[in-house]
Image: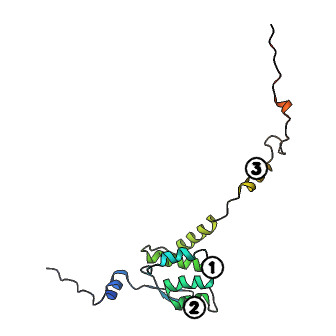
């Protein structure tokens, strides 16, 4: 018979055994790598993702990495930048959902979101741009033609 593995003494011990207790250093601070998203985090993230408020950013960081991280990264003398913040949040969220992404992959995803959100020109802007295009044959703007020059000559029947 094989020896049975002993049962961990608590849920916390079991969770650590299953998911590990990895840490990483971010901007001079050692933080625990998230192994699960806090309950309600996704909803709160959706509500706050377009906010420019420092307090909202601090709330998300605190939920994922703790109050010490929020204070150090957002209020400390070496505040992190916006791309750093979104990269570490994206990386942490991926880790918490069981996706072992690299920092580079998280950064690439952030930059794709930033570039991908370029505003589309409205209809008036598209029409104005289309009217400014030069004619293909001369390189200049096309000249309007009168209705008289575009109609066919009238044919009469002989008869």
Between 4 and 142, the residue placed more toward the observer is 142
Answer whether labels 2 and 3 touch (C-beta < 8 Å).
Answer: no
Mark 1 or mark 3, which is nearer the start of the sequence? Answer: 1
Q: In the rendered view, would you say 9 is above or below 135?
A: below
**Residue behind mark 3:** 130
Q: CA distance from mark 2 to mark 3?
A: 51 Å
**Residue behind mark 2:** 71
Residue at the spot 59% in from the left edge and 67% down from the top edge? 112
Residue 90 as seen in the image, left or right of residue 157: left
Query: Residue 30, how many percent across, how many down?
Result: 50, 89
Q: CA distance from mark 2 to mark 1?
A: 15 Å
Residue at the spot 82% in from the left edge and 45% down from the top edge? 139
Answer whether labels 2 and 1 touch (C-beta < 8 Å).
Answer: no
Q: Kindly indicate the quadrant of the structure image that contains residue 27.
A: bottom right
Q: Kindly indicate the quadrant of the structure image that contains residue 145.
A: top right
Query: Residue 76, how many percent across, how many down?
Result: 62, 92
Task: Please tell me whether mark 1 sits on a helix, a strand or a loop.
Answer: helix
Q: Kindly indicate the quadrant of the structure image that contains residue 49.
A: bottom right
**Quadrant in which the C terminus is drawn:** top right
Q: CA distance from mark 3 to mark 1?
A: 36 Å
Please tell me the numbered disc located at residue 82. 1
């Amino acid at each position: 018979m094989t020896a049975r593995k002993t049962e961990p003494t608590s849920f916390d011990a079991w969770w650590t055994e299953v998911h590990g207790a990895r840490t990483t250093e971010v901007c001079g601070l050692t933080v625990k790598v998230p192994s699960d998203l806090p309950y309600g985090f996704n909803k709160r993230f959706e509500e706050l993702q377009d906010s420019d408020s420092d307090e909202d950013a601090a709330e998300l960081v605190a939920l994922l990495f703790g109050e010490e991280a929020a204070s150090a990264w957002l209020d400390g003398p070496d505040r992190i930048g916006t791309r750093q913040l979104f990269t570490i949040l994206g990386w942490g969220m991926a880790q918490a959902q069981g996706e072992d992404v690299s920092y580079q992959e998280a950064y690439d995803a952030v930059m794709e979101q930033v570039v991908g959100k370029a505003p589309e020109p409205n209809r008036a802007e598209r029409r104005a741009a289309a009217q400014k295009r030069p004619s293909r044959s001369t390189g200049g703007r096309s000249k309007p033609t009168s209705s008289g020059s575009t109609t066919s000559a009238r044919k009469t029947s002989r008869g």
